[in-house]
Image: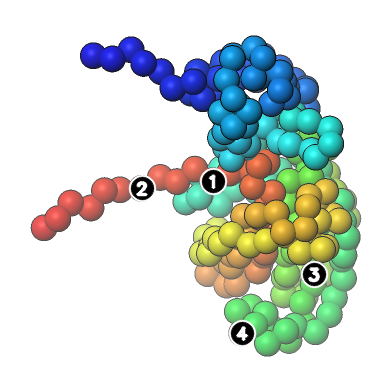
């Protein structure tokens, strides 16, 4: 059996060990420093680091260097869980910045899915430990949530607020896609225009099966992930 280990893999594993002991945003060696330390070409060093970038363990800033990425907020795709609960479960502090809140006429798609002509819109930048993770636009039937979401929605969980008012989020259906960050995403989330985002669009019903919330969440892929539970279907 061969004990040969590709150089890029050895560098990658060495970096993983270092990253585990470093704080988020700590600087990492440059490609030139990796070349000198491991005696490899710049292409090999860059390839090892790029694999870690793709996994969301590190991030690059042109002209500044490569840094340890904050731990991603993950949730299981098959379960409804509020963003606040997701972050708290991994030991973080959730918060939000409201960028839009108020009533307006429903779009054709909103009217069809929620069954109303007027909606209440709550648009927030969702943060974990002060770092922007997602731009979330939640739309509710205006009459059902009248007065319910007028209070604190920056620190409080909207799911908990709705449940406290008798509107218990119970089940839903979501579609997930990859999309490029648009100019507004770039501005509000602090990413580059065109950077890949994980976009989730979901419709949530209450305990009585009545549509309660239509939401689009635009997640920064390097700061958020989905874990998936699944069954294996064997051939019959």
Q: Residue furthest left?
A: 236
Residue behind mark 4: 112
Between residue 47 and residue 140, name the one nearer to us: 47
Between residue 10 and residue 110, name the one nearer to us: 10
In this view of the protein, can residue 230 be seen by the observer? yes
Instruction: Name which quarter of the figure residue 84 lies in.
Output: top right
Question: What is the distance, in whole Å, between disc 3 and disc 4 at their CAs?
Answer: 16 Å
Instruction: Name which quarter of the figure residue 54 lies in.
Output: top right
Residue behind mark 3: 121
- Label 4 crowd bin: few (<14), some (14–19), many (20+), radius 10 Å: few
Indicate left or right for 24 with 228 as reference.
Answer: right
How many numbered callouts? 4
Residue 157 drawn above or below residue 98: above
Question: What is the distance, in whole Å, between disc 3 and disc 1 at their CAs?
Answer: 25 Å
Quadrant including the C terminus: bottom left
Residue behind mark 1: 226
**Between disc 2 and disc 3, whose residue precedes?**
3
Question: What is the distance, in whole Å, between disc 2 and disc 3 at their CAs?
Answer: 33 Å
Residue located at (60% from left, 72% from top): 211
Q: Viewer-nearest of labels 2 and 3?
A: 2
Q: Position of residue 75 (x, y in %)?
A: 56, 43
Circle 4: element type: helix
Residue behind mark 2: 230
């Amino acid at each position: 059996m061969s004990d040969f280990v590709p150089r890029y893999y050895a560098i990658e594993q060495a970096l993983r060990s270092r990253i585990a002991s470093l704080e988020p945003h700590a600087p990492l060696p440059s490609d030139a420093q990796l070349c000198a330390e491991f005696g490899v070409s710049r292409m090999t060093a860059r390839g090892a680091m790029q694999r870690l970038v793709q996994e969301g363990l590190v991030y690059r800033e042109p002209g500044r260097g490569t840094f340890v990425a904050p731990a991603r907020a993950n949730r299981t795709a098959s379960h409804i869980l509020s963003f606040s609960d997701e972050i708290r479960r991994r030991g973080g502090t959730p918060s939000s910045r409201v960028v839009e809140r108020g009533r307006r006429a429903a779009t054709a798609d909103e009217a069809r899915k929620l069954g109303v002509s007027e909606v209440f819109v709550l648009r927030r930048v969702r943060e974990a430990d002060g770092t922007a993770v997602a731009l979330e636009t939640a739309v509710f039937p205006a009459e059902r949530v009248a007065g319910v979401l007028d209070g604190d929605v920056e620190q409080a969980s909207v799911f908990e607020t709705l449940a406290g008012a008798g509107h218990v989020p119970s089940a839903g259906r979501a579609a997930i896609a990859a999309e490029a960050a648009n100019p507004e995403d770039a501005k509000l989330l602090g990413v580059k225009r065109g950077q890949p985002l994980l976009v989730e669009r979901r419709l949530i019903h209450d305990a009585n099966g009545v549509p309660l919330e239509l939401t689009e969440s635009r997640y920064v892929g390097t700061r958020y992930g989905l874990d998936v539970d699944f069954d294996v279907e064997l051939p019959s």
